[in-house]
């Protein structure tokens, strides 16, 4: 089995022989990412991406809190592989080159390129990874939201000024500089990261909840200012 599932991400890719494959990346607490190739809705083959050992020494609590987030990125120019971004075991981000040649059985993939350097990586578990064009965003238990360059694997910016853990974030793909965040202190924050802003960042408090209530997820409606959010007590608002 795959253990507890922590993240899912779909993509479609065209193989060298012209066929289109639907692929589902599955992150789990088993310290690996499974990539399933499907044809007509049926599983035809599987890749297993094994997370490398973390560079930093993890505490016992961190070792027991592995959370693998996954997101497909813009494909490589090389049509023989797709690009998948995942979190690692110790707060690092990893870029995988996932082969499009699926055979019988499970194909193991063991090599991944880490984003870095380590001094700017997340210090604790990464909860969320999302991608758009040549950028990647991540959230972590260290209360940091970071933006990364997918080509250079370098960090562009990060902020740690939120009042609680960041449980989720959402962007409008038509305006990737507009980010909404769900925080563990019961608030929803909006950031405008447009490079045209003279102050560097526009920040707003979109919603302030009740005491002792966590906002666990958030979704931004495309091409609008509407943001939906979910609470740990089962309520949904916008």
Image (cartoon, rainbow, N blue to C red):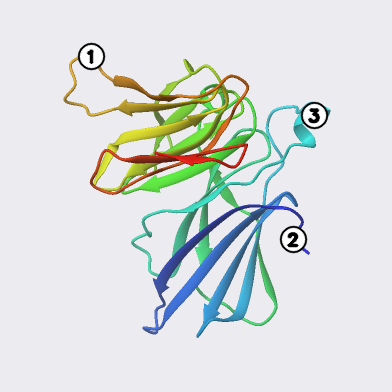
Residue 171: assigned label? none
What residue is at 67 percent from the left and 49 percent from the top? 51
- Is tag 3's residue or tag 1's residue first in the polypeptide sequence? 3
Secondary structure at numbered mark 3: helix
Q: Is residue 204 above or below residue 140?
A: above
Residue 2: assigned label? 2
Q: Position of residue 64 (x, y in %)?
A: 80, 37
Q: For residue 134, what is the image quadrant?
A: top left
Is residue 19 toward the left or the right of residue 88 in the image?
Answer: left
Residue 61: assigned label? 3
In the image, 160 versus 112, the foreground residue is 160
Is residue 187 toward the left or the right of residue 171 in the image?
Answer: right
Secondary structure at numbered mark 2: loop
* Mark 2 Cα-neighbour bin, 10 Å: few <14, some 14–19, many ≥20: few
Q: CA distance from mark 3 to mark 1?
A: 39 Å
Q: CA distance from mark 1 to mark 2?
A: 46 Å
Q: Position of residue 120 (x, y in %)?
A: 51, 23
Task: Tell whether label 2 touches label 1 (CB within 8 Å).
Answer: no
């Amino acid at each position: 089995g795959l253990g507890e599932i922590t993240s899912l991400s779909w993509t479609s890719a065209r193989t060298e022989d012209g066929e289109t494959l639907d692929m589902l990346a599955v992150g789990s607490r088993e310290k690996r990412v499974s990539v399933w190739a499907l044809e007509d809705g049926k599983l035809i083959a599987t890749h297993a991406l094994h997370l490398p050992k973390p560079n930093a020494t993890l505490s016992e609590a961190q070792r027991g809190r592995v959370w693998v987030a996954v997101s497909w990125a813009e494909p490589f120019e090389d049509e023989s592989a797709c690009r998948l971004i995942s979190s690692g075991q110790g707060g690092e981000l990893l870029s995988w080159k996932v082969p499009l040649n699926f055979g019988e059985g499970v194909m193991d993939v063991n090599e991944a390129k880490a984003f870095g350097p380590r001094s700017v990586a997340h210090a604790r578990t990464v909860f969320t990874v999302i991608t758009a064009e040549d950028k990647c965003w991540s959230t972590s238990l260290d209360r940091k939201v970071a933006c990364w360059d997918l080509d250079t694997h370098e960090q562009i910016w990060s902020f740690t000024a939120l009042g609680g853990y960041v449980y989720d974030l959402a962007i409008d793909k038509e305006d990737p500089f507009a980010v909404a965040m769900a925080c563990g202190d019961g608030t929803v924050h909006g950031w405008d990261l447009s490079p045209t802003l003279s102050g560097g960042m526009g920040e707003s408090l979109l919603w302030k909840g009740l005491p002792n209530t966590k906002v666990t997820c958030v979704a931004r409606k495309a091409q609008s200012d509407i943001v939906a959010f979910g609470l740990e007590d089962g309520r949904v608002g916008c």
